[in-house]
Image (cartoon, helix red, strand yellow):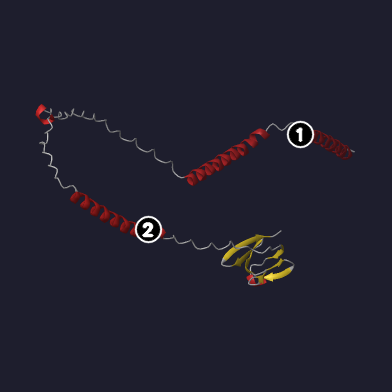
Amino acid sequence: MSVILDALKKLDRDKSSRRSGAANIAVEILRPDLTRPGKRAPLYLAIAFLTAIVTAAITYGVMVKEGPPSKPSPPLAVSPTVPHPEAAPVTLPGEPIRSARDEIIPVPPKTQAPVKSKKPAAPLVESKGDAAKMKQNVTVKGADIAPEKAKISPEPPPREPAATFPSLNISAIVWYEEPSKRFAMINGLIVTEGSVVEGMKVEEIYPDRVRFLHRSQHLEIPIK
């Protein structure tokens, strides 16, 4: 009987210990975790340290790209102003005083009038001969001058009429990098580079215009 009682007591003890263990587990679960802030402190320190390292690396990279700060240029040395020497007054030489003797104008001596001869006919004949000679000289000089006035100035060459270009209508352009593949629709005709339309040579085809050559003159017509 004692053995049975001892076994029953052990069972009761085991049941009570199990109940107390379950209660302790519930208490431990419901108990607030007070040790967590202490465990998180090293994590916060590590994050702050890594942030400081990254910030320092970014700052160093920016400073290396911008280059060292330029040295301030030394101040310019200002030379002291030297007073300009005053120009000495220049004395102009005075005009020479004209004396009364210099102002006296010499009077030419009076010449006696020639005595008139009693034969006035000879001087008249001579004067007539001189007049005839003067007339001959005048006529000769006039004959020499007349041809110069009669010279006709050469007429300027007639100006060439301005080149008139025929009317061309460009309705389409197909442009390639290779010139041989380019063509355009001009006045309803398909034309390539080097062709002649209305007497005008197609010199080059562009994406939006065509360049023509007519009588050694270039003309560019845009597409319409």
**154 above or below 46?**
below
Q: Quadrant of residue 154?
A: bottom left
Q: From the viewer's perspective, is 193 left or right of 121?
A: right
Q: Which residue is mark 2?
A: 146
Q: Earlier in the sequence, mark 2 or mark 1?
A: 1
Residue type of the residue flagged with mark 2: Ala
Q: Position of residue 165 (x, y in %)?
A: 64, 63
Q: Nearer the viewer, residue 27 or 106?
A: 106
Q: Residues within 10 Å of mark 2 (few under 14, many from 20)?
A: few
Q: Position of residue 104 (x, y in %)?
A: 12, 30
Q: Nearer the viewer, mark 2 or mark 1?
A: 2
Q: Position of residue 97 (x, y in %)?
A: 12, 27
Q: CA distance from mark 2 to mark 1?
A: 146 Å
Tag 2 and tag 1, C-beta contact below 8 Å? no
Q: From the viewer's perspective, is 175 left or right of 60?
A: right
**188 above or below 40?**
below
Q: Residues within 10 Å of mark 1 (few under 14, many from 20)?
A: few
* Label 1 SS: helix
Q: From the viewer's perspective, is 23 left or right of 55?
A: right
Q: Nearer the viewer, residue 177 or 180?
A: 180
* Label 2 SS: helix
Q: Position of residue 51 (x, y in %)?
A: 58, 40
Q: Nearer the viewer, residue 123 or 157?
A: 123
Q: Quadrant of residue 37?
A: top right
Residue type of the residue flagged with mark 1: Glu
Q: Which mark is residue 28?
A: 1
Instruction: State the quadrant of the C terminus.
Output: bottom right
Residue at screen point 89% across, 39% down:
4
The count of marks equals 2
